[in-house]
Amino acid sequence: MFAVTGITGQVGGAAALDTGLSVRGVMRDAAKGGAWKERGCEIALADMKDAGALTAALSGVDGVFVLIPPIFDPTPGFPEARGIIAAVTTAIEAAKPSKVVCLSTIGAQATQPNLLNQLGLLEQALSTVPSPVCFLRAAWYMDNAAWDVAPARDAGVVPSFLQPLDKPVPMVATADIGHLAATLLQETWTGRRIVELEGPRRITPNDIAATFAEILGRPVRMEAVPRDAWEGLFASQGMKNPTPRARMLDGFNEGWIEFENGEQSSRKGHTELKTVLKQLVARG
């Protein structure tokens, strides 16, 4: 049996379904467990900050998939993420699963302050646990384009923080992340391991616009949001600490958020951008 945290999300759900084996879904909300029970999953209730509940949820399994909830507007110093990381680390040390696959991110190794440092902290903490650990560093999610569907459909103009608009960006479909996570859970290794994943090819913002245009049957273009407007815009949307998010975007645009071993060494998923965008458009 494998324990999967974040099973109610896209990546965790895909990982659980792709194992084809018995799964214990770890979730905070019992109300979300019904559909997974119908699929034959065991359900364990645990908040990601509760080391005791997590220890019970992660005990007696052959492997664990760890996915911590994203915190897009962190307090300076990342205390929210640090609390979750401490609980997860304590639970894994106590439960001693035979292996751990941890969802991380492209650029987790970057030393420049930015939003993705939270996953760098997670990697540092889990590198000390006794179980073999594999860090799955995934590229920018193609599925983030869900936010672009409405402006593409309604106005034909999509604001882009990824710039220049013709710069290729490493991206990957969440379905491919879940599939690889399930594959890794069934492999055997020792010590610490890093696997980096992106899609079949790198994608520019202009590629996204062109693909939306093809799917929607109307002209669609990207429009770069000026850098000096970002933090004010994010603050107007309710963010209290917008700088880490802005610096993350800088990292993609300036190239210092990249795979540690470069594009040549990354694994490549199979899902194309058009497949993902068609699904997003269909969902509305």
Image (spheres, rainbow, N blue to C red):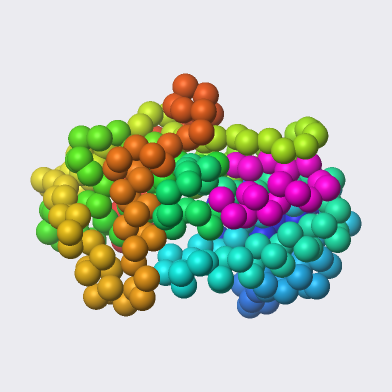
Instruction: Confirm whether residue 33 shows in the render.
Output: no
Q: Position of residue 203 (x, y in %)?
A: 31, 35
Q: Position of residue 190 (x, y in %)?
A: 80, 34
Please tell me whether residue 157 is drawn above or below residue 217 in the rendered image: below
- Quarter-of-image position of residue 165: top left
Q: Position of residue 56 (x, y in %)?
A: 83, 67
Q: Residue at x 48, y 46 (%)?
A: 111
Magenta span covers which residues? 120-136
Q: Position of residue 72 (x, y in %)?
A: 43, 65
Q: Residue at x 86, y 61 (%)?
A: 94
Query: Which one is in front, 149 or 134?
Result: 134
Query: Which one is in front, 282 or 82?
Result: 82
**Is residue 234 found inside the magenta-colored segment of the image?**
no
Q: Residue furthest right?
A: 60
Please tell me whether residue 66 is drawn above or below residue 47 in the rendered image: above
Query: Which one is in front, 280 or 256?
Result: 256
Please tell me whether residue 279 is drawn above or below residue 186 in the rendered image: below
**Is residue 133 found inside the magenta-colored segment of the image?**
yes
- Quarter-of-image position of residue 180: top right
